[in-house]
Image (cartoon, helix red, strand yellow):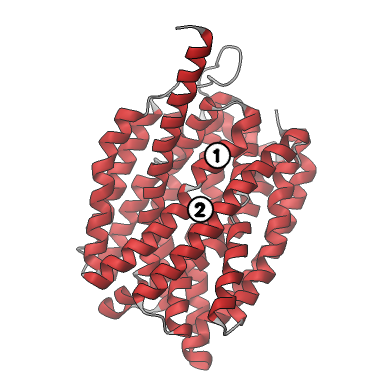
Amino acid sequence: MNAADAAATKVRNRTLVMAALVVCYTLNFVDRQIIGILAEPIKGELQLTDSELGWMGGAAFALFYTFLAIPLAMLADRHDRSWIISGGLFFWSLMTAACGFAQNFWQLFMARMGVGVGEAAGVAPAYSLISDLYPPHQRAKALAIFSLGIPIGSALGVLFGGLLAATVDWRFAFLAIGAAGCLFAPLFKWIVRDPGHGRSEEGPRAAAPSFGTVFRTLASKPSFWLLGFGAGTASLVSYGLAFWIPSFLARSYELSLVDRSWLYAFIALLGGSAGIYFGGLLGDRLGNAHPRGYALVPAIAFAITGPLNMLAFATTNLWLATLAFIVPGALSLAWLGPVNTAITRLVPPEMRATASAMFLFINNLVGLGLGTFVVGAISDALTARFAEEALRYSAMATNLIYVLSAVLMLLAARRLSKDII
């Protein structure tokens, strides 16, 4: 095989691995977001409040997901990442199926915790693996392509979850989607081979450092904390709204389960995919020109997202609301490629998975842990005054947090050129 053929084979193999990673991340978000479209039937059968739905949709998942991600990422910095990801995929899919057997709030809460345990093995090791498949100048686009699993998975989770629940019931939706993930896990392991740590950079790779070493490295870089909390506060809003928009469509527009499944799947797929992909392209272009570009892309996006989302929730015209949801839905996810690339460039290759997990710790503790609960708790507090429209005003109030997110990203932009290695 000559050099040209070897290079072509390497690209084909890399593309196949990326495709498997995208499918895995899609299943990650199918299992994560299906709870949103099923919230209303679950609430009716199990007699839950909005606050309880918020705890179950966010904190139950985030509790172990957030804390286990770091030790699993440290393992991924030392061992075969494909085994870690495929094992997590099988376990979170199994626990998704277990949600279908829940008879009360606490049983469903515990099953969702199990989903979080499995998904803790999925993201940071994948970021690290992708960073070894693609060189730095292509990394924002590559991470953005991987992150397309978010809108695709969210859309499929909403669509298939809603259609299966409408056809059979919400329990069958959990069982069917969980079974699909369990079947894909061995195929994923067969396709994905770990390329080796540090393969995208020249020179020898150092041994994987301790957690304390990684923490001290990141603690000395203000941009890491600004990026972490900037993304975390934005995720608080975006995760919260992703969970509650189907319920908003049911309560304020009286859409059936099938109708709101199709509508929100369309919003999530179109807006999310466009935002993530073009955010990655801009991140590569601006970030390669100057490191501050990695933070300026999300700063501008967040500044626009809040007002447009408030318009979407304020209008009583369904078609205007749909259009208004698509654009901020795109802008709210444009940070994924640029910010995740910046995190991988703050540390040497042997620290990437652990550094990514520490970033995800902040992002998920704030975003996943609080987002759905905050929107639900405000809705409960406003119900006495606004009845079914309480969720509308709760969502509008939560969007004000995007101002803080934009400011934190602007501050990060000022530091990145000093912190990136």
Whether residues under marks 2 and 1 lie with C-beta atoms below 8 angstroms apart, the answer is no
State whether residue 76 is above or below residue 365: above
Residue at the extreme bottom: 385
Judge whether residue 120 can be spotted in this image: no
Residue 22 versus residue 201: which sits nearer the camera?
A: 22
Judge whether residue 27 can be spotted in this image: yes
Instruction: Please name the residue shown 74% across and 48% down the image.
Output: 296
Image location of residue 254, percent across then percent down = 42, 84
Instruction: Please name the residue shown 50% across and 32% down the image.
Output: 130
Image location of residue 14, percent across then percent down = 46, 27
Mark 2 residue element: helix
Instruction: Please name the residue shown 55% across and 16% down the image.
Output: 205
In this rendering, the label closer to the viewer, 2 or 1: 1
Look at label 2 and name its amino acid.
Asn
The answer to whether residue 149 is left or right of residue 38 is: right
Which disc number belongs to residue 397?
A: none
The answer to whether residue 286 is left or right of residue 8 is: right
* Distance between mark 2 and mark 1 Cα atoms: 18 Å
For disc 2, the neighbor class at 10 Å (few under 14, some 14 to 19, many from 20) is: many
Which disc number belongs to residue 143?
A: 1
State whether residue 161 is above or below residue 122: below
For disc 1, the neighbor class at 10 Å (few under 14, some 14 to 19, many from 20) is: many
Residue 351 versus residue 345: which sits nearer the camera?
A: 345
Residue 176 versus residue 127: which sits nearer the camera?
A: 176
Image location of residue 421, percent across then percent down = 70, 27
Q: Quadrant of residue 59?
A: bottom left
Which residue corresponds to mark 2?
364
